[in-house]
Image (spheres, rainbow, N blue to C red):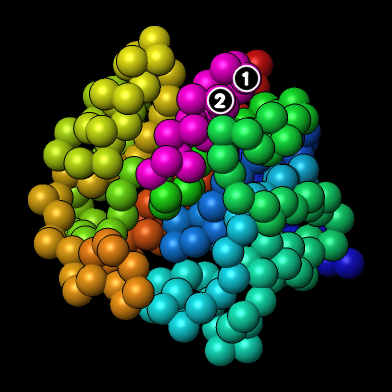
Amino acid sequence: MNDFHERTRLLIGDKGLKKIASKNIFLAGLGGVGAYIAEALVRAGVIHLTMHDADIVSVSNINRQLIALNSTLGKKKVDVMEARLLDINPNCICKTQDFFITKETMPDVLKDDFDVIIDAIDVFNCKLAFLHFAYQKRSRLYSSMGAGNRVDPTKIRTGDLFESRHCRLAKILRKKLRHSGIESGIKAVWSEEIGHAPGIMEEGKNRAVNGSISTIPAIFGLTIAGLVINDILTDIE
């Protein structure tokens, strides 16, 4: 097999590649943000990756999700993502989980020891339960805020979740997490763009649907992957 790390090695050297390959990473969510995180990490040299998503690919995913194609409709997102990553690097050690995240299942979700834990979940209650539990693991923790209803890439910001501004999702999470004694230590990506109003009510469900476009979720995902890789490389002595 050709060495696809050739260009990466020119930038960060063998030491950097070995450091990246040594990390055990967990990613929750393989939607518009999460799939880009997974692929960017593996292309950068991550080998040990556990991915969680209970959803299947649907038509409404095609406008923004990396793994959403006409050929993948109806398939489990974890299965499609795993096959894609192994096609990039057959030596990648992928583990997948496809059950729903609840307070009761959290111990099974994060039962192993991880160096890095990444939240790309788009359901609020699951996201809150995940962040609360993941924080206790004392791993490096990263989280994506709301990428929906936004179009301006220049408004995207990074930093500690508790320093975020103009993101309604982040505001509610900060309040809930503070009640649990968590006030810092979650690195996040968010947008300071004032979000557009949600669209029509989803048929058969009592909730509005966030509009989305191809660019913003992808930028969120690649930004988080970049933060993770940069933090790993910064540890090199």
The mark found on residue 81 in the picture is: none
Q: Secondary structure at mark 1?
A: loop
Q: Quadrant of residue 180?
A: top left
| Residue 199, percent from left and from top | 18, 70
Residue most extreme to the bottom:
70
Q: Is residue 153 above or below residue 11?
A: below
Q: Is residue 192 above or below residue 86?
A: above
Residue 119 vs residue 132, the one in the foreground: 132
Q: Work out which quarter of the rendered image holds the N terminus and state it.
A: bottom right
Q: Is residue 172 left or right of residue 28?
A: left
Residue at left 27%, top 41%? 169
Q: Is residue 132 magenta?
A: yes
Q: Main secondary structure of the magenta part?
A: helix
| Residue 99, percent from left and from top | 67, 52
Residue at left 12%, top 62%? 197
According to the picture, the residue beneath numbered tag 2 turns out to be: 133
On the question of residue 209 being in view, the answer is: yes
Q: Is residue 5 left or right of residue 38?
A: right
Under mark 2, the amino acid is: Phe
Residue 206 vs residue 14, the one in the foreground: 206
Query: How much space separates mark 1 and mark 2, taking CA atoms?
Result: 7 Å
Residues drawn in magenta = 124-142
Q: Are marks 1 and 2 in contact (CB under 8 Å)?
A: yes
Residue 110 vs residue 8, the one in the foreground: 110
Residue at left 45%, top 56%? 33
Dot 1: within a 10 Å radius of its alpha carbon, few (fewer than 14), some, or many (20 or more) residues?
A: some
Q: Is residue 231 above or below residue 210?
A: above
The mark found on residue 137 in the picture is: 1
Q: Work out which quarter of the rendered image holds the C terminus and state it.
A: top right
Residue at left 23%, top 46%? 191
